[in-house]
Image (cartoon, rainbow, N blue to C red):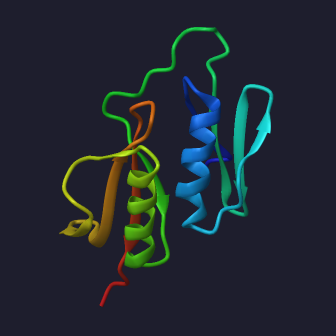
Amino acid sequence: MFSHVMIGTNNLEKAKAFYDALLGTLGVPPGMVDRHRVFWRTKTGTFAVTLPINGQAATFANGGTLGFACESPEQVDAWHAAGCAHGGTSCEEPPGVREGAAGRLHLAYLRDLDGNKICALYRYPRA
């Protein structure tokens, strides 16, 4: 459905270091810098951060969350640990299992260096 997702940052260098570490836990190679943006490309899509083109400060989306798919609960936990170790802030509940209408999920939430809410998600197979 999506070709790419791009969010704003106020510090491209710090954002690249943060997301290189975070996405590295998911097997994503380091991002490629292109002028005022950084792109992380995979077979399933592209994630990017950018300095705002209009020259204004980047702000986060109130109520917005960007989710990253994981292959295991351990990968979710490694993602969360890498994010915290590189300046992210844990938010919502601690990483772990949540059950609801969407089934059984292993989730972890962070705020990145610019305040964007991001999530790692592993969906357990239905029994």
Q: Is residue 60 left or right of residue 21?
A: left
Q: Could you tell me if residue 6 is visible in this image?
A: no
The residue at the point 49 percent across, 57 percent down is 68
Q: Is residue 55 above or below residue 80?
A: above
Q: Could you tell me if residue 44 is visible in this image?
A: yes
The residue at the point 73 percent across, 25 percent down is 36
x, y (%) of residue 57? 51, 13
Q: Quadrant of residue 51?
A: top right
Q: Is residue 37 above or below residue 125?
A: above
Q: Quadrant of residue 63?
A: top left
Q: Is residue 78 above or below residue 126?
A: above
Which residue extends farthest bottom?
A: 127
Q: Is residue 98 left or right of residue 80?
A: left
Q: Is residue 2 above or below residue 73?
A: above
x, y (%) of residue 120? 41, 60
The residue at the point 35 percent across, 80 percent down is 124
Q: Quadrant of residue 23?
A: bottom right
The residue at the point 52 percent across, 56 percent down is 22
x, y (%) of residue 56? 56, 9
x, y (%) of residue 127? 30, 91
- Asked whether 125 or 82 is in front, the reply is 82
